[in-house]
Amino acid sequence: MNDEDVEDGQALLDVHAVPFNHREVWIGKGVYPVRDGTYLMPPCSTLSDVTLFCVPNQICGEGANDPVFVVIVFDTVLGADGVGRIAEFKAARPSTRLATVLSSCPGQLDQDPRGPEKEYYILGGLFSEHFVVQQDDLFNVPDHLTDAEAAALPPAGLTAWRAVFTKGQVREGQNVLITGIGGGVALMALLFCVAAGANVYVNSSDNAKIRKAIELGAQGDKWDFQLQNLTHGEPFDVVIDGAGGDGFKAFTELLRMGDIIVTYGMTVKFEVDYTMVAVLRNIEVRGSTMGSRVEFGEMVDFVAKHKIKPVVSQVWPGLESDEEAFNFIKAGTQFGKLVLSLKSESKL
């Protein structure tokens, strides 16, 4: 690959490190949600990727009120984001150390903060030594981050930023519950909330993860009903949840009337229990997926200002370690992001 492969407005990235996300696990297992409770079929037999395009039904000629669905493109390369150095560019602004976010395309969330205006996609392809990317998808890496920390930032950081601030509207002094602490998004949400001056509480079935979260500024317990003891009976203002399932009934009882549950994923169960009790208490449920370039820029600036460091659970050398990372993340024992390093550790 050389500069002849790079078009105006693009850059050739020399990839230094990439994160391993749950997205890669779901794709590999063939359980990436497609439409109406169905999943990607058949399961991928290898770690060859699919590119997922989320397309409004109007574009495909279906009813405007039908659900958005996913178009699957097989045999592309894994990896949605990473960090690297620009090797070649055309008409680029002068910059060298950059992180990439490849969760958006022109039109996605650029104008309307409620959600995407047009089709959007996770591009894929970063599990490679070089990658051609649109320059709009490149952002300067904060100077205090290592390669691994910078690689861990884009997917988890953007998702957490939108969930916490755009959808959750978290403010200083609020009581915020972040469920299932240990994953990359939940930990970034924790770090953002602490930096914003909120009172952060976490839960987990793993006492070791709770102890580590407390070291990062949270308070925590195993069970939801015990968490309110930590707040001295005060209700929560916001719940940030990535599990789905049956926890919503407990959230309804823990939240102040009229407050917010933000859900950015459903790793436990692809449905939630939203009852009439929640309706009568005016509890809002807000879905949150990835984010915009504007939000990504705001997130990176916030990370730089507060010197926030994404939590990295483990780093493996080389792309050939992807199977080991795949098995590690399936076990669910990590605390933080998993990263594949393609270069010797550096600050680029």
Image (cartoon, grey):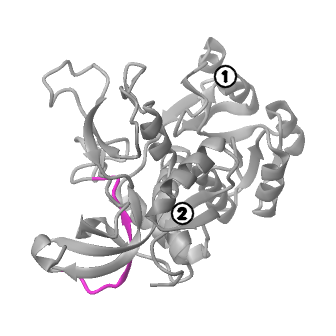
Q: How far apart, in angstroms, are the residues tagged by discs 2 and 1?
A: 31 Å
Q: Nearer the viewer, residue 42 or 13?
A: 42
Measuring from the top left, give residue 187's x and y in whole percent. Answer: 64, 55
Measuring from the top left, give residue 253's x and y in whole percent. Answer: 74, 25
Measuring from the top left, give residue 51's x and y in whole percent. Answer: 29, 44
In the image, the segment drawn in magenta is 92-104
Q: Is residue 229 left or right of residue 125?
A: right
Give the mark toward the camera: 2 or 1: 2
Say above or below: 118 vs 135. above
Q: Is residue 204 left or right of residue 31?
A: right
Q: Quadrant of residue 60?
A: top left
Q: Quadrant of residue 218?
A: bottom right
Specify which label sits upstream in the sequence, 2 or 1: 1
Residue at image location 47% in from the left, 69% down from the top = 300
Measuring from the top left, give residue 127's x and y in whole percent. Answer: 38, 60
Q: Nearer the viewer, residue 68 or 237?
A: 68
Q: Is residue 36 magenta?
A: no
For badge 1, the amino acid type reads: Asp
- Give the label on residue 339, or none: 2
> Considering the numbered disc 1 on the image, is that residue within a helix, a strand or a loop?
loop
Residue at image location 65% in from the left, 65% down from the top = 195
Pointer 1: what residue?
A: 246
